[in-house]
Amino acid sequence: MSWAVEEWKEGLSPRVLQKIQELESQVDKLKKERQQRQFQLESLEAALHKQKQKVENEKNEAATLKRENQSLMELCDNLEKAKQKISHDLQVKESQVNIQSGQLNSSKKDIERLEQELKR
């Protein structure tokens, strides 16, 4: 088959044949260059796709972390409110204990005084 492709070159001058050969060589070179660039383009497109996927994954992770952070902040707020309530309740109970302790001491003094009166 290659002899049929070469048939059209018969009868051409050596100078023209040389020019054809140079042009064919240049075409082959350009074809190889095109293939290399096509491969580079495909590689770059694959890398771009991979980077886009990575960015999307990081966005999703950031959104998840943001939600988790918000949840933790709400939990901290709730715990702080509970701590304040417990602290307030403790102060109230300590106050009640102090009042009852004072009443107990007063009652003890009254009992001692009454016992002293009874002994007289």
Image (cartoon, rainbow, N blue to C red):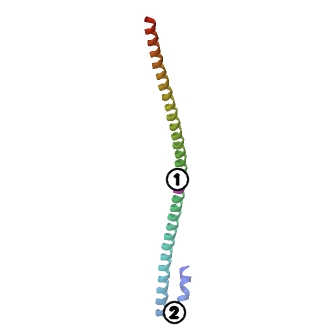
Q: Which residues are magenta?
A: 58-65
Residue drawn 46% across and 86% down?
A: 22
Q: Could you tell me the amino acid type at mark 2?
A: Leu
Q: What quarter of the picture does the N terminus occupy?
A: bottom right
Location of mark 2 (residue): 12
Q: Earlier in the sequence, mark 2 or mark 1?
A: 2
Residue drawn 51% across and 61% down?
A: 50
Q: Label 1: few (<14), some or many (≥20) within 10 Å?
A: few
Q: Which mark is residue 61?
A: 1
| Helix, strand or loop status at disc 2 | loop
Q: Label 2: few (<14), some or many (≥20) within 10 Å?
A: few
Q: Is residue 84 above or below residue 42?
A: above
Q: Is residue 38 above or below residue 2?
A: above
Spot the residue most to the front.
120
Q: Is residue 106 above or below residue 41?
A: above
Q: Position of residue 105 (x, y in %)?
A: 45, 19
Residue drawn 49% across and 83% down?
A: 24
Q: Position of residue 11 (x, y in %)?
A: 52, 92
